[in-house]
Image (cartoon, rainbow, N blue to C red):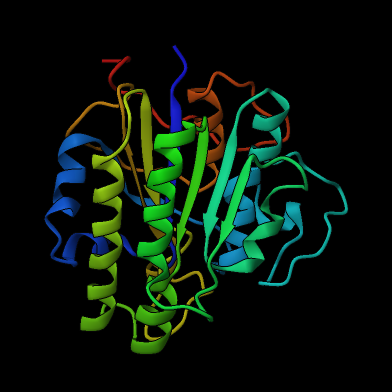
Amino acid sequence: MAEKVILVLVDGMRPDGLMQCGHPFAKKLTEIGTCFLSAQTVMPSVTLPCHMSLFHSVDPDRHGILSNTYVPQVRPIEGLVDRLDNRGKKCAFFYNWEELRDLSRPDHLHTSLLISEHKTDDTDRKLTDAAIRYIQDETPDFLFLYLGETDELGGHDNGWMSEIYLQVVNNAIDCVERLYENLPAGYTLILTADHGGHDRGHGSDMPEDMTIPICCIGSKFKAGVSLPGGSIKDIAVTVADLLGVDRVKEWEGKILPYTAETE
């Protein structure tokens, strides 16, 4: 039976930042789900190229986005949202960085909410509250919740793994916990990041920049399992499979193991 999926991305969240942020739900994630704490993102490890690779399941040299400025694809690939909508699935975006608007083509989202982090405070919490209300009222098939404060306020302003960075990660995980506790039955929650970071930046092939967490909590994933491997390119393929939708032929990722079904 197909699942519905909530994908939460915490911008710039390193796996060690997740595990050291001090929030009890961070440890609980490893107890209730299947976690890949050494998964890899793509080069350049920059926000928009990484998101394009997440939603299109190819490397940046294939989709053509190499910076935080979007340019139309020369050889277009159908992205995750477009694929799901074309198969009759209700999709929604809740985000606070306007550049992410180009992750899907026009008229493929049922609902989209942008709260600009440059114009209002506490956007992670506000977006999470709005997403919870929308999920409970509209029960979308797929919802993407982007939490951007960790990258900007935590990493770039104060340094990755600084005390303030870990506090902002803690705040993001608090949002994830509230979302999880308010999910209706039949949903899988996937938590990930686009990239990590070092000092006050990212974009290199250093392990600190390239390594991301992927945590999957739902009926098809075994609880308490930690597995090696995993790629940001695997997420679109996995989401589509959970929703019972056929993959796009150009996608390069693999389905993350459904350990609850393959013991």
In what quadrant of the picture does the N terminus appear? top left
- In the image, residue 261 above or below residue 135: above
- Is there any visible trace of residue 162 in the rendered image? no
Which image quarter: residue 23? bottom left
Q: Name the residue rendered at 43%, 32% in the picture.
A: 256
Residue 115 appears in the picture as rendered = yes
Residue 54 is situated, as x and y percent measured from the top left of the image, at 57, 49
- Which of these two is toward me, 72 or 95? 95
Q: Report the residue at 63% width, 61% height from top.
A: 100
Residue located farthest toward the right when viewing the structure as drawn: 74
- Of the 4 image quadrants, the one containing the C terminus is top left
Based on the displayed image, in which of its 4 quarters is residue 166 positioned? bottom left
Position of 34 relative to 12 (above/below): above
Please count the marks in the image.
0
Image height of 105 relative to 97, above or below = above
Residue 242 versus residue 49 in the image, above or below: above
Q: Is residue 111 left or right of residue 208?
A: right
On the rendered structure, is 108 left or right of 203? right
Q: Can you give x and y, in whole percent of width and height, for residue 51 in the image? A: 58, 56
Q: Position of residue 151 (x, y in %)?
A: 42, 74
Q: Is residue 107 left or right of residue 246?
A: right
